Image: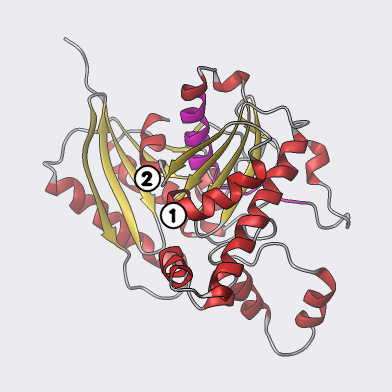
Amino acid sequence: MSDVYRVLVVNPGSTGTKLAIFSTAGREAEETVSAPPEKGPLLAQLPSRVQAAREFLARHGAVPLHAVVGRGGLIRPVPSGTLAVNEAMLEDARRGYQGEHVSNLGCLIAHGLASERGIPAFVVDPVAVDEMIPLARYSGLPGLPRQALSHALNLHAAARKACERLGKKLSESRLVVAHLGGGFSIVPMEAGRIVDTNHANSGGPFSPTRAGTLPTQPLVRLCFSGSATAADLKRMTTKEGGLLAHLGTHDALEVESRIAQGDLKAREVYEAMAYQTAKEIGAMATVLCCRLDAVVLTGGLAHSNLFCTWVSDRVAPLAPLFRFPGEFEMEALARG
């Protein structure tokens, strides 16, 4: 008789928590539960999110579980792969070791549910995956080294899909992978390792909500102009930048609708985002000496034929281009 193993997958997002049960037979159940209304510190949401997961399990017959896996957040730098949740990780998540982000709740929710059942808790390819080469860490100021924060979970999932298409092992591949969501992570991946990254909150192309790389001297003047606080600047650059700042919306479908109706400003801004994305892909290709097996586009914007065509036209000479629209985080967490 073959054994059936089941895991609960927990993926907290800003507007809700994605919950799923996977077994050796495949996906058995999945729901997205709305985020709790609590304001204030992120940790205030933890009890409500844990309770929502308990209720999800109750709705599906309280099936026996062998493990709980959560999305990993801004803990201290770690290698890629599957990591057991321990007290040091939990403390990093509570403190926001590398910043506050809803993904920090992933290991905390997983631990809470797993400890009730006496089963292990894990995270897979957290945002804090750090496999950058030493040269990639330098900035122009010694006190400001570059950080390795990226959408590592979906980047690795898309890379594995590309390798299946190529008929290559991930450990033998050389790829540039671009996760194109609300923020963009564009990385060179060598043998499955993310050896550099733009860090979506601090550099690279502008995206639907992030400002991306900014001109340094005007930014310094803005910081000391008295017109914005530190909190204002953080919000402007990570939540209200990019398409939203230029066009008043971060919805790519709305932008494309405007373009179809002849809005030249919307077209120029949207194409500029594609231009900067292609430029960053080219820069990351040089990390691998432009010897690539493929360029890979994933995330929500990979659905857009218009945007991806603009990118592809500029990067096509580098390598074959694969598109895997959307995100594969739940499957990747379960697989891990």
Most foreground residue, 39 or 34:
34
Q: Is residue 287 visible?
A: yes
Q: Horizontal and vertical percent for residue 120?
A: 37, 33
Which residue is disc 2 drawn over?
A: 110
Q: Residues within 10 Å of mark 1 (few under 14, many from 20)?
A: many
Which residue is disc 1 drawn over?
A: 105
Disc tally is: 2
Q: Is residue 239 visible?
A: no
Q: State which quadrant residue 260 falls in.
A: bottom left
Q: CA distance from mark 1 to mark 2?
A: 8 Å
Please say whether residue 132 is one of the residues in the magenta stretch. no
Residue under the point 62% across and 18% down: 172
Question: On the picture, is 163 further left or further right than 4?
Answer: right
Q: Secondary structure at mark 1?
A: helix
Quadrant location, the N terminus:
top left
Amino acid at dot 1: Leu
- The magenta region covers 146-163
Outermost residue to the bottom:
226
Residue under the point 22% across and 25% down: 25
Residue under the point 31% across and 67% down: 36
Amino acid at dot 2: Ala
Question: On the picture, is 208 further left or further right than 141?
Answer: left
Q: State which quadrant residue 45 falls in.
A: bottom left
Most foreground residue, 13 or 267:
267
Most foreground residue, 252 or 217:
252
Q: Horizontal and vertical percent for residue 4?
A: 22, 21
Q: State which quadrant residue 223 falls in.
A: bottom right
Question: On the picture, is 53 further left or further right than 160?
Answer: left
Q: Horizontal and vertical percent for residue 240?
A: 56, 74
Q: Horizontal and vertical percent for residue 144?
A: 81, 57
